[in-house]
């Protein structure tokens, strides 16, 4: 709750701006198609950036974990704060792990590294595995993109149209 005793004309201007912005979001269906498509592209590429960054930072951390170093790209990435930009500051964080020279953790890291290399070698024994993985992941991304774009633009989903046809029979 925000209590401000002084009345100012700027308060009414801000209130009017908030109401206009909220009404414009509520009237999303009547936005021009180019604007809806632009908002969709911005949303999609922001999502791809955020997911890609999360995957890259996990891979980098996991790789350097085996050496005994905590190396984080965007260490505050998943921390909730008042300012979303705080998630990207600082850019890097490097710390030596307290258990770097602990014998038990050294065995754990060694076993983990051997397991990862073994699984990678088994996966890459057949050259078509990587090709199948890459084409399948590309198809999934394309399907998700098209589905989201159709939902965002208001294009009816084919699966609901098929259900209506089946129920009409």
Image: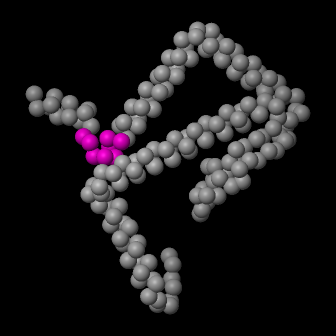
153 inside magenta stretch: yes
**Residue at horizontal 80 percent and vertical 45 percent from the top:** 94
Question: Residue 64's spot in the image, x, y percent?
Answer: 77, 33
Extreme residue toward the top, this view: 126
**Residue at horizontal 68 percent and vertical 48 percent from the top:** 74
**Residue at horizontal 35 percent and vertical 37 percent from the top:** 147
Question: Residue 123's spot in the image, x, y percent?
Answer: 61, 14
Q: How is the image coloured?
A: one colour
Q: Is residue 93 left or right of residue 131?
A: right
Quadrant for residue 25, please give it.
bottom left
Q: Is residue 132 left or right of residue 116?
A: left
Residue 37's place in the image compared with 104, above or below, is: below
Prevailing secondary structure of the magenta residues: helix
- Which residues are the magenta region? 149-156
Quadrant for residue 126, please give it.
top right
Question: Residue 114's spot in the image, x, y percent?
Answer: 75, 19
The quadrant in which the C terminus is found is: top left
Extreme residue toward the front, this view: 34
Front-most of residues 79 and 63 = 63
**Residue at horizontal 86 percent and vertical 35 percent from the top:** 100
162 inside magenta stretch: no
Residue 129's place in the image compared with 76, above or below, is: above
Question: Residue 113's spot in the image, x, y percent?
Answer: 75, 23
Q: Count every numbered label the image shows and give the total.
A: 0
């Amino acid at each position: 709750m925000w209590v401000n005793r002084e009345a100012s004309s700027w308060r009414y201007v801000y209130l009017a701006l908030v109401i206009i912005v909220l009404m414009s979001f509520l009237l999303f269906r009547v936005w021009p198609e180019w604007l809806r498509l632009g908002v969709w592209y911005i949303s999609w590429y922001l999502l791809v950036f955020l997911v890609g960054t999360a995957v890259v930072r996990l891979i980098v951390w996991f790789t350097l974990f085996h050496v005994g170093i905590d190396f984080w790209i965007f260490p505050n990435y998943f921390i909730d704060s008042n300012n979303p930009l705080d998630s990207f500051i600082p850019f890097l964080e490097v710390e030596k792990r307290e258990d770097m020279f602990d014998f038990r953790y050294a065995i754990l890291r060694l076993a983990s590294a051997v397991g990862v290399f073994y699984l990678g070698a088994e996966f890459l024994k057949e050259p078509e595995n990587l090709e199948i993985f890459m084409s399948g992941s590309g198809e999934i991304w394309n399907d998700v993109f098209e589905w989201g774009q159709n939902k965002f633009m208001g294009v009816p989903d084919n699966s609901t149209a098929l259900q209506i046809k089946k129920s009409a029979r």
